[in-house]
Amino acid sequence: MSAGLVSDPRFEEHDTGAGHPESPKRLASIHAALRASGLDARFRAVEPESADDALLTSVHDPDHIRVVERACAGGGLLDADTTVCPESARIARLAAGSLAALCRRVARGELERGLALVRPPGHHAERNRAMGFCLFNNVAVAAADLLRRDGIERVVVVDWDVHHGNGTQHIFEERADVFYASIHQSPLYPGTGGRSERGSGAGLGTTLNCPLPPGSGDAAFLGALNDEILPAAERFDPQFVLVSAGFDAHHADPLANLEVTTAAFAEATRALLGLARRHAAGRLVSVLEGGYDVDALAESVAAHADAILTGAGQT
Protein backbone atom coordinates (compact mmCIF):
# COMPACT_ATOMS: atom_id res chain seq x y z
CA MET A 1 0.00 0.00 0.00
CA SER A 2 1.18 3.51 -0.72
CA ALA A 3 1.06 6.87 1.01
CA GLY A 4 -0.58 9.94 -0.47
CA LEU A 5 0.67 13.51 -0.36
CA VAL A 6 -1.27 16.76 -0.76
CA SER A 7 1.16 19.52 -1.73
CA ASP A 8 0.45 22.45 -4.03
CA PRO A 9 1.98 25.89 -4.68
CA ARG A 10 -1.45 27.46 -4.17
CA PHE A 11 -1.09 27.02 -0.42
CA GLU A 12 1.68 29.61 -0.54
CA GLU A 13 -0.76 32.23 -1.91
CA HIS A 14 -2.12 32.84 1.60
CA ASP A 15 -0.01 35.95 2.20
CA THR A 16 0.35 36.89 5.86
CA GLY A 17 2.72 39.78 5.26
CA ALA A 18 6.33 40.52 6.07
CA GLY A 19 7.53 39.21 9.40
CA HIS A 20 4.53 37.03 10.18
CA PRO A 21 5.63 33.63 11.55
CA GLU A 22 2.99 31.67 9.60
CA SER A 23 4.48 32.60 6.24
CA PRO A 24 4.64 30.91 2.81
CA LYS A 25 8.33 30.30 3.53
CA ARG A 26 7.27 27.46 5.82
CA LEU A 27 5.98 25.36 2.93
CA ALA A 28 8.77 26.45 0.60
CA SER A 29 11.34 25.13 3.08
CA ILE A 30 9.47 21.84 3.50
CA HIS A 31 9.16 21.28 -0.24
CA ALA A 32 12.87 21.95 -0.72
CA ALA A 33 13.76 19.40 1.97
CA LEU A 34 11.46 16.73 0.54
CA ARG A 35 12.85 17.25 -2.97
CA ALA A 36 16.45 17.17 -1.77
CA SER A 37 15.89 13.89 0.05
CA GLY A 38 13.78 12.31 -2.69
CA LEU A 39 10.93 11.77 -0.26
CA ASP A 40 8.38 13.64 -2.36
CA ALA A 41 8.81 11.19 -5.24
CA ARG A 42 7.97 8.26 -2.97
CA PHE A 43 4.46 9.58 -2.26
CA ARG A 44 1.47 9.35 -4.56
CA ALA A 45 0.31 12.87 -5.38
CA VAL A 46 -3.28 13.65 -4.39
CA GLU A 47 -5.01 16.50 -6.21
CA PRO A 48 -6.18 19.29 -3.89
CA GLU A 49 -9.93 19.89 -3.61
CA SER A 50 -11.82 22.89 -2.31
CA ALA A 51 -14.28 22.49 0.57
CA ASP A 52 -17.82 23.57 -0.26
CA ASP A 53 -20.22 25.05 2.27
CA ALA A 54 -21.74 21.64 3.06
CA LEU A 55 -18.36 20.30 4.10
CA LEU A 56 -17.41 23.37 6.15
CA THR A 57 -20.76 23.58 7.94
CA SER A 58 -20.29 20.08 9.31
CA VAL A 59 -18.14 21.80 11.97
CA HIS A 60 -18.57 25.57 11.43
CA ASP A 61 -21.55 27.89 11.70
CA PRO A 62 -22.62 29.29 8.32
CA ASP A 63 -22.15 32.81 9.67
CA HIS A 64 -18.50 32.01 10.43
CA ILE A 65 -17.85 31.18 6.80
CA ARG A 66 -19.35 34.47 5.66
CA VAL A 67 -17.39 36.45 8.27
CA VAL A 68 -14.12 34.88 7.10
CA GLU A 69 -14.92 35.53 3.45
CA ARG A 70 -15.83 39.18 4.04
CA ALA A 71 -12.71 39.77 6.15
CA CYS A 72 -10.44 38.18 3.57
CA ALA A 73 -11.96 40.15 0.73
CA GLY A 74 -10.72 43.33 2.39
CA GLY A 75 -7.47 41.88 3.74
CA GLY A 76 -6.03 42.81 7.11
CA LEU A 77 -6.63 41.07 10.44
CA LEU A 78 -9.22 38.55 11.66
CA ASP A 79 -7.75 38.87 15.14
CA ALA A 80 -4.51 40.24 16.58
CA ASP A 81 -2.54 37.24 15.26
CA THR A 82 -4.46 36.15 12.17
CA THR A 83 -3.54 38.10 9.05
CA VAL A 84 -5.41 37.50 5.81
CA CYS A 85 -5.28 38.63 2.20
CA PRO A 86 -7.92 38.52 -0.58
CA GLU A 87 -6.91 34.95 -1.50
CA SER A 88 -6.96 33.60 2.07
CA ALA A 89 -10.55 32.33 2.22
CA ARG A 90 -10.10 30.47 -1.07
CA ILE A 91 -6.86 28.89 0.11
CA ALA A 92 -8.37 28.00 3.50
CA ARG A 93 -11.20 26.19 1.70
CA LEU A 94 -8.57 24.37 -0.36
CA ALA A 95 -6.71 23.31 2.78
CA ALA A 96 -9.79 21.89 4.48
CA GLY A 97 -11.15 20.23 1.37
CA SER A 98 -7.82 18.71 0.39
CA LEU A 99 -7.33 17.05 3.76
CA ALA A 100 -10.86 15.64 3.62
CA ALA A 101 -10.25 14.34 0.09
CA LEU A 102 -7.01 12.65 1.14
CA CYS A 103 -8.76 11.04 4.10
CA ARG A 104 -11.56 9.75 1.88
CA ARG A 105 -9.03 8.02 -0.38
CA VAL A 106 -7.43 6.37 2.64
CA ALA A 107 -10.83 5.36 4.01
CA ARG A 108 -11.72 3.76 0.66
CA GLY A 109 -8.50 1.75 0.68
CA GLU A 110 -6.92 3.50 -2.31
CA LEU A 111 -4.08 4.63 -0.04
CA GLU A 112 -2.93 3.33 3.32
CA ARG A 113 -1.62 6.56 4.81
CA GLY A 114 -1.31 10.22 3.93
CA LEU A 115 0.31 13.58 4.62
CA ALA A 116 -1.32 16.94 3.91
CA LEU A 117 1.11 19.85 3.64
CA VAL A 118 -1.42 22.64 3.68
CA ARG A 119 -1.86 26.11 5.10
CA PRO A 120 -3.35 28.03 6.76
CA PRO A 121 -3.32 25.68 9.75
CA GLY A 122 -6.61 24.85 11.42
CA HIS A 123 -6.67 23.47 14.93
CA HIS A 124 -7.38 26.79 16.72
CA ALA A 125 -10.43 27.60 14.59
CA GLU A 126 -13.61 27.31 16.66
CA ARG A 127 -17.06 26.58 15.32
CA ASN A 128 -17.72 30.30 14.99
CA ARG A 129 -14.35 31.98 15.40
CA ALA A 130 -11.09 32.24 13.47
CA MET A 131 -8.02 32.63 15.67
CA GLY A 132 -4.36 31.73 16.12
CA PHE A 133 -3.47 31.84 12.38
CA CYS A 134 -6.41 29.47 11.66
CA LEU A 135 -9.51 30.21 9.52
CA PHE A 136 -11.24 26.84 9.13
CA ASN A 137 -10.52 23.76 11.23
CA ASN A 138 -8.98 21.39 8.70
CA VAL A 139 -8.68 18.32 10.91
CA ALA A 140 -12.17 18.74 12.35
CA VAL A 141 -13.66 19.03 8.85
CA ALA A 142 -11.87 15.83 7.83
CA ALA A 143 -12.91 13.93 10.96
CA ALA A 144 -16.56 14.91 10.60
CA ASP A 145 -16.49 13.90 6.94
CA LEU A 146 -14.95 10.53 7.76
CA LEU A 147 -17.67 9.78 10.29
CA ARG A 148 -20.24 10.03 7.52
CA ARG A 149 -18.45 7.26 5.60
CA ASP A 150 -19.35 3.56 5.76
CA GLY A 151 -17.14 1.67 8.17
CA ILE A 152 -15.76 4.67 10.07
CA GLU A 153 -17.48 5.04 13.43
CA ARG A 154 -14.63 6.17 15.69
CA VAL A 155 -11.81 8.61 14.89
CA VAL A 156 -8.80 9.53 17.03
CA VAL A 157 -7.21 12.96 16.63
CA VAL A 158 -3.73 13.24 18.19
CA ASP A 159 -2.52 16.84 18.31
CA TRP A 160 1.15 17.37 19.17
CA ASP A 161 1.37 21.03 18.16
CA VAL A 162 2.99 22.99 21.01
CA HIS A 163 -0.19 25.10 21.28
CA HIS A 164 -3.37 23.40 22.47
CA GLY A 165 -5.91 22.76 19.70
CA ASN A 166 -8.79 24.51 21.40
CA GLY A 167 -10.93 24.54 18.26
CA THR A 168 -10.73 20.80 17.62
CA GLN A 169 -11.39 19.99 21.26
CA HIS A 170 -14.40 22.28 21.54
CA ILE A 171 -15.97 21.13 18.26
CA PHE A 172 -15.94 17.49 19.39
CA GLU A 173 -16.03 17.67 23.19
CA GLU A 174 -19.66 16.52 23.40
CA ARG A 175 -19.26 13.66 20.90
CA ALA A 176 -18.46 10.07 21.74
CA ASP A 177 -17.17 9.15 18.27
CA VAL A 178 -14.06 11.39 18.29
CA PHE A 179 -11.25 10.95 20.80
CA TYR A 180 -9.14 14.11 20.97
CA ALA A 181 -5.73 13.97 22.65
CA SER A 182 -3.22 16.81 22.89
CA ILE A 183 0.38 17.24 23.98
CA HIS A 184 1.16 20.93 24.38
CA GLN A 185 3.08 23.46 26.44
CA SER A 186 1.35 25.10 29.37
CA PRO A 187 1.19 27.95 30.12
CA LEU A 188 1.02 29.13 26.51
CA TYR A 189 -1.48 30.42 23.96
CA PRO A 190 -4.45 29.90 23.83
CA GLY A 191 -4.63 29.10 27.55
CA THR A 192 -6.85 26.03 27.23
CA GLY A 193 -6.03 22.32 27.49
CA GLY A 194 -5.94 21.61 31.20
CA ARG A 195 -6.09 18.07 32.48
CA SER A 196 -9.54 18.73 33.92
CA GLU A 197 -10.92 19.23 30.39
CA ARG A 198 -12.16 15.72 29.61
CA GLY A 199 -15.19 16.39 27.40
CA SER A 200 -18.81 16.64 28.42
CA GLY A 201 -22.14 14.90 27.96
CA ALA A 202 -21.85 11.95 25.60
CA GLY A 203 -18.23 12.93 25.03
CA LEU A 204 -17.13 12.78 28.66
CA GLY A 205 -13.83 10.91 28.73
CA THR A 206 -13.06 11.35 25.02
CA THR A 207 -10.76 14.34 25.57
CA LEU A 208 -7.28 13.84 27.01
CA ASN A 209 -4.89 16.74 27.55
CA CYS A 210 -1.24 16.30 28.44
CA PRO A 211 0.12 19.78 29.20
CA LEU A 212 3.90 20.01 29.58
CA PRO A 213 5.80 22.73 31.43
CA PRO A 214 8.35 24.92 29.61
CA GLY A 215 11.69 23.18 29.19
CA SER A 216 10.21 19.72 28.69
CA GLY A 217 12.02 17.62 26.14
CA ASP A 218 11.85 14.26 24.40
CA ALA A 219 11.32 12.17 27.53
CA ALA A 220 8.25 14.13 28.62
CA PHE A 221 6.88 14.45 25.07
CA LEU A 222 7.20 10.75 24.26
CA GLY A 223 6.18 9.77 27.77
CA ALA A 224 2.87 11.62 27.39
CA LEU A 225 2.27 9.86 24.09
CA ASN A 226 3.31 6.35 25.10
CA ASP A 227 2.16 6.28 28.71
CA GLU A 228 -1.08 8.28 28.51
CA ILE A 229 -2.40 8.85 25.02
CA LEU A 230 -1.69 5.49 23.41
CA PRO A 231 -3.28 3.38 26.18
CA ALA A 232 -6.40 5.58 26.13
CA ALA A 233 -6.55 5.48 22.34
CA GLU A 234 -6.19 1.68 22.39
CA ARG A 235 -9.25 1.46 24.62
CA PHE A 236 -11.17 3.76 22.29
CA ASP A 237 -10.41 1.36 19.41
CA PRO A 238 -10.29 3.89 16.55
CA GLN A 239 -11.02 3.08 12.94
CA PHE A 240 -9.02 6.05 11.65
CA VAL A 241 -6.08 7.99 13.10
CA LEU A 242 -5.63 11.70 12.37
CA VAL A 243 -2.56 13.66 13.45
CA SER A 244 -2.52 17.43 13.92
CA ALA A 245 1.22 17.61 13.36
CA GLY A 246 2.67 20.87 14.54
CA PHE A 247 6.45 21.00 14.88
CA ASP A 248 6.71 24.08 17.10
CA ALA A 249 7.59 21.97 20.12
CA HIS A 250 11.03 21.70 18.47
CA HIS A 251 13.83 23.15 20.57
CA ALA A 252 14.67 25.68 17.85
CA ASP A 253 11.17 27.11 17.52
CA PRO A 254 10.86 30.82 18.39
CA LEU A 255 7.24 30.78 19.62
CA ALA A 256 7.49 28.26 22.45
CA ASN A 257 9.81 26.78 25.05
CA LEU A 258 9.79 23.01 24.71
CA GLU A 259 12.96 21.11 23.84
CA VAL A 260 11.74 18.33 21.55
CA THR A 261 14.11 16.99 18.87
CA THR A 262 13.51 15.97 15.29
CA ALA A 263 14.13 12.35 16.23
CA ALA A 264 11.31 12.44 18.76
CA PHE A 265 8.80 13.54 16.11
CA ALA A 266 9.83 10.55 13.98
CA GLU A 267 9.47 8.21 16.95
CA ALA A 268 6.03 9.64 17.75
CA THR A 269 5.00 9.08 14.14
CA ARG A 270 6.04 5.43 14.29
CA ALA A 271 4.12 4.95 17.53
CA LEU A 272 0.92 6.30 16.00
CA LEU A 273 1.41 4.17 12.89
CA GLY A 274 1.50 1.20 15.23
CA LEU A 275 -1.81 2.29 16.75
CA ALA A 276 -3.28 2.65 13.26
CA ARG A 277 -2.15 -0.84 12.25
CA ARG A 278 -3.54 -2.48 15.38
CA HIS A 279 -6.94 -0.81 15.26
CA ALA A 280 -7.56 1.05 12.00
CA ALA A 281 -6.24 -1.20 9.22
CA GLY A 282 -3.22 1.11 9.03
CA ARG A 283 -5.32 4.16 8.17
CA LEU A 284 -3.47 7.29 9.31
CA VAL A 285 -3.39 10.80 7.85
CA SER A 286 -1.31 13.67 9.16
CA VAL A 287 -1.91 17.37 8.52
CA LEU A 288 0.55 20.19 9.06
CA GLU A 289 -0.24 22.63 11.85
CA GLY A 290 2.49 24.88 13.35
CA GLY A 291 6.27 25.10 13.26
CA TYR A 292 7.96 28.46 12.78
CA ASP A 293 11.71 27.94 12.54
CA VAL A 294 11.82 27.09 8.84
CA ASP A 295 14.94 24.93 9.04
CA ALA A 296 13.75 22.92 12.04
CA LEU A 297 10.33 22.62 10.45
CA ALA A 298 11.71 21.28 7.17
CA GLU A 299 13.95 18.79 8.96
CA SER A 300 11.13 17.61 11.23
CA VAL A 301 8.58 17.23 8.44
CA ALA A 302 11.11 15.25 6.40
CA ALA A 303 11.64 12.86 9.32
CA HIS A 304 7.87 12.63 9.84
CA ALA A 305 7.30 11.97 6.13
CA ASP A 306 9.99 9.29 6.04
CA ALA A 307 8.34 7.50 8.97
CA ILE A 308 4.95 7.66 7.26
CA LEU A 309 6.44 6.20 4.08
CA THR A 310 8.29 3.37 5.76
CA GLY A 311 5.39 2.55 8.05
CA ALA A 312 7.76 1.20 10.69
CA GLY A 313 6.54 1.06 14.26
CA GLN A 314 5.00 -1.01 16.98
CA THR A 315 3.29 -4.21 15.92
Image (cartoon, rainbow, N blue to C red):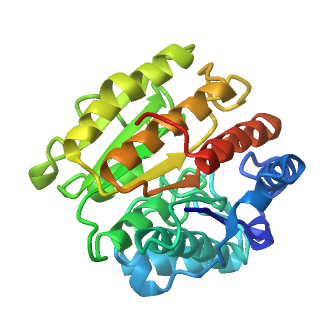
Badge count: 0
Q: Residue 115's spot in the image, x, y percent? A: 60, 57
> Residue visible at 64% across and 77% down?
48
**In this rendering, does residue 60 appear at all?**
no
Looking at the figure, which quarter contains the C terminus?
top left
> Residue visible at 31% across and 59% down?
171
Left or right, 33 with respect to 54, comes to right
The correct choice, above or below, for 159 with respect to 254 in the image is below
> Residue visible at 79% across and 61% down?
41
Looking at the figure, which quarter contains the N terminus?
bottom right
Q: Which of 242 and 128 is in front in this view?
A: 242
> Residue visible at 72% across and 77% down?
87
Within the image, what quadrant is residue 7 found in? bottom right
Q: Residue 144's spot in the image, x, y percent? A: 34, 69
**In this rendering, does residue 111 appear at all?**
yes
Q: Residue 158's spot in the image, x, y percent? A: 41, 44
Residue that extends furthest to the left in the rendered view of this protein:
201
Q: Residue 113's spot in the image, x, y percent? A: 53, 58
Left or right, 134 with respect to 11, comes to left
Left or right, 147 with respect to 274, comes to left
Left or right, 238 with respect to 145, comes to left
Q: Nearer the viewer, residue 187 or 97?
A: 97
The correct choice, above or below, for 257 with respect to 25 in the image is above
